[in-house]
Amino acid sequence: MNQLNRGHSKIAHRLPLFVLAVCLVMSVSTEVAADERLVIIVNAHNPVEMLTLREVRILYENGLIPWADGTQVTFFDLNITDGARRKFSQTVLKQEALWVHRDWIQKKLNNTAINPPQMLHSSLLVQRRVAQHPGGIGYLLEKDLSMAGVKVIATIE
């Protein structure tokens, strides 16, 4: 067995342990009240003014789609323990956050991940990164929106 196959084999054996660890971490996750709204944000200079939830889902699921002006889309995700991440995954992607995360891990292991989201650990970091990247897109709770350099293009009840 060559080095590459041995590396994949080790990773495949560790995947169940990783999933178990994620489940344990999720037990201390943050919660989002049902009435808290999420907002989808993009860089303030992005020419897009509005997207439907369907369009947001297409962007997140098909990482290669560029913005209308040709700028490469850069996705920013919150940690899977974040309540806003879980609400986004359930409402927009129609899957549990853990399963979305697992799918991206599987794609990375299979070398099929094209432009995966960058996972960040706070709403402030999501806003900062979206403001820094012309093609940036992210989401957060509306109440956490606090920075210039980004604009809201969709709201999720």
Image (cartoon, rainbow, N blue to C red):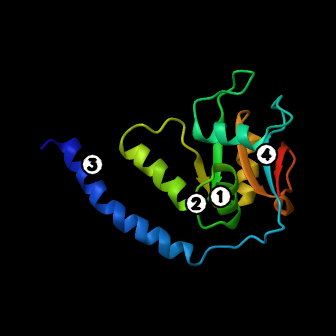
Q: Quick check: 62 above or below 66? A: below
* Residue ID for mark 4: 41
Q: CA distance from mark 4 to mark 3?
A: 36 Å
Identify which residue, 96 or 49, lies in the foreground: 96
Q: Position of residue 100 (x, y in %)?
A: 54, 53
Q: Quick check: 138 above or below 32? A: above
Task: Answer with mark 2 or mark 1, whichever residue precedes in sequence.
Answer: 1
* Residue ID for mark 3: 8
Secondary element under disc 2, as helix, strand or loop, is loop
Q: Position of residue 79 (x, y in %)?
A: 60, 61
Q: Residue at x 54, y 42 (%)?
A: 116
Q: Which mark is residue 96?
A: 2
* Residue ID for mark 1: 90
Nearer to us of marks 3 and 2 is 2
Q: Quick check: 119 above or below 53? A: below
Q: Residue at x 23, y 52 (%)?
A: 9
Assign the C terminus to one quadrant of the image.
bottom right
Contact (Cβ within 8 Å) of mark 2 with mark 1: yes
Nearer to us of marks 2 and 4 is 2
Question: Which amino acid does the dot numbered 3 rest on?
Answer: His
Assign the N terminus to one quadrant of the image.
top left
Question: Which amino acid does the dot numbered 2 rest on?
Answer: Glu
Task: Answer with mark 2 or mark 4, whichever residue precedes in sequence.
Answer: 4
Figure label count: 4
